[in-house]
Amino acid sequence: MLRLNEQVYHAIRRHGEETYPHECCGVLLGRSVDGVNDVEDAIRAGNTRTDSAHNRYNIAPQELVRIQRQGRERGLDIVGFYHSHPDHPAQWSKTDFAEAHWLGCSYVITAVEKGVAQATNSFLLTGTTEEDKAFEDEAVEVAALETERC
């Protein structure tokens, strides 16, 4: 299961709307406990694809290392990635699968139709090696933000 709060959920979807008609991308920082990827923050990343940014994304290795270090400084790990699908369903593609390598991570996709975020789905990358990896549909739980009590 993927768990995130409303603020993070809406930030991911807003990022997809802002980059439309190109794909957005980013990294999910949090903790993985008992089969739950619990997200605390979504860090925007630049899409370095210049050849087909409307239907592909790439996060530069240097940026990924920088985000991973930021997370570790906060006691967080990379628990997933997100990107948008402009004018396409929130379903992984063959390219998404081929380029997914972080086993145990959640891969979140938001469909953005005509500039407006629609469905947001998550897929858990399972397996032990590249040869037996698979995407599994993953439940998404969006928790309400906790408010201070008097």
Image: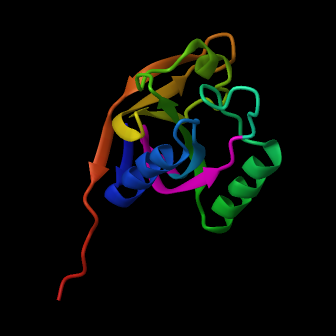
Task: Decide which of 82, 75 is in the foreground and name it.
Answer: 82
Q: How many marks?
A: 0
Residue found at the far bottom of this picture: 150
Residue 133 versus residue 74 in the image, above or below: above
State the image quarter where residue 43 is shown: bottom right
Q: Which residues are magenta?
A: 31-47
The percent coordinates of residue 74 (x first, y second) are 61, 67
Task: Decide which of 39, 99 is in the foreground and name it.
Answer: 99
Question: In the image, 34: left or right of 144?
Answer: right
Judging from the image, the colouring scheme is: rainbow
Task: Decide which of 70, 33 is in the foreground and name it.
Answer: 70
Task: Decide which of 115, 32 is in the foreground and name it.
Answer: 115
Residue 31 versus residue 148 in the image, above or below: above
Quadrant occupied by the C terminus: bottom left
Residue 95 versus residue 1 in the image, above or below: above
Residue drawn where x is 68% and y is 23% of the image = 99
The percent coordinates of residue 2 (x first, y second) are 39, 41
Quadrant occupied by the N terminus: top left
Residue drawn where x is 60% and y is 25% of the image = 55
Residue drawn where x is 60% and y is 16% of the image = 133
Residue drawn where x is 44% and y is 55% of the image = 11
Question: In the image, 114: left or right of 135?
Answer: left
The percent coordinates of residue 82 (x first, y second) are 53, 40
Residue found at the far left of this picture: 150
Q: Main secondary structure of the magenta part?
A: strand
Question: In the image, 22: left or right of 47?
Answer: left
Residue found at the far right of this picture: 62
Residue 40 highlighted magenta (yes or no) = yes
Residue 30 highlighted magenta (yes or no) = no
